[in-house]
Amino acid sequence: MAEASNARLTRLLTLVPWLAQHSGISKQEAAAHFGMTVAALEADLELITVTGPGLFGGDLVDITFEDETVTVYDAQGLVEPLRLTAEESSALLLGLHALQQLPDVDAAVVAGLIEKLGERNDAALEVQVSSGPYVTRISEAIATGQDIRIHYLHPVRDDHSDRVVTPVNLITRDGVDYLLGWCHLVQAYRTFRLDRVQGCEMVGPAAAAANPPGELDRPSNQATVVLPAALEYLLESVPARIDQRGSELVASIDFGDDAWLVGWLVACGTQVRCLTPERIAHSVAQKRADSRAAYAALALAQGAGH
């Protein structure tokens, strides 16, 4: 794949001042520092040596690299390393402050980066990440092997339920925080959006969960669903990505458990259709047919009773 011209330009502007500060360094060391091959380094140096404020020898960057080393004789003023603008530095600090407050992050490393950037930035930043009031408690439960009881708002049925969960991990996808864990109510692994957790308390040592899920944050399956644009809010309850917009939405949903996805689709109603995989679409159609048959039998029984 061809390299973008702006990416190469950025590297060239960084390369010259660095080589000027390390004049005489070997090509191997210089290439390793920039994560490139010696051949790519030589190609960059060939371009640099025909660069300058004019067209003649005295106006061009003077670098020799014919042997195994690189020596800079005249950098034509390109000796200052690239520096972040105030806007770039502030944006980076903002991201680091946000990162520092997320679980499973090496806070010491992030704090060191913030300190270094702060020395070159006068902006005073205070960032609060809205990841819900229970992140610390859930993180503690994961670290100490505790079960938790959560009061959870179900987005499709619009009701609440109390569930005992063995927490496994906290992840963030597309800016949304999720709890992954073994739900003792349904005896299966489930994903819970943290912004729908209305209460959380520890209830004691975690019970052993059957069939460990492996890497829960990397579901091996993906479904494609279609639904009216007016029902987009239904996708808020699942790890979904909207692939196509219009009067109808086409969305991809990551899932690790067929039964969970089938249950979600059935609960959403017939306006939400599953295109792939076929096994899910078939299971949903069968579930809906069974439900209609059950309702018909109930109506018939009630009619006979009168």
Image (spheres, grey):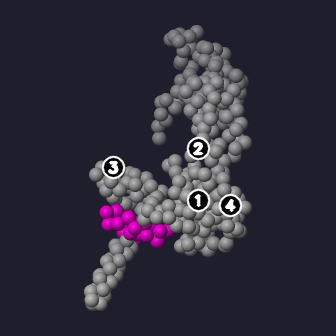
Amino acid carrying label 4: it is: Ala
Q: Label 2, on which residue?
A: 129
Identify the secondary structure beneath mark 3: loop
Label 1 to label 4: alpha-carbon separation: 14 Å
Label 2 to label 1: alpha-carbon separation: 19 Å
- Point out the tag, 3 or 2, that comes first from the N-terminus: 2
The foreground one among 49 and 281 is 281
Identify the secondary structure beneath mark 4: helix
| Residue 69 visible, this orientation | no
Label 3 to label 4: alpha-carbon separation: 40 Å
Amino acid carrying label 2: it is: Val
Res 52 label: none
Residue 157 among magenta residues: no
Label 3 to label 1: alpha-carbon separation: 35 Å
Q: Label 1, on which residue?
A: 199
Q: Label 4, on which residue?
A: 141
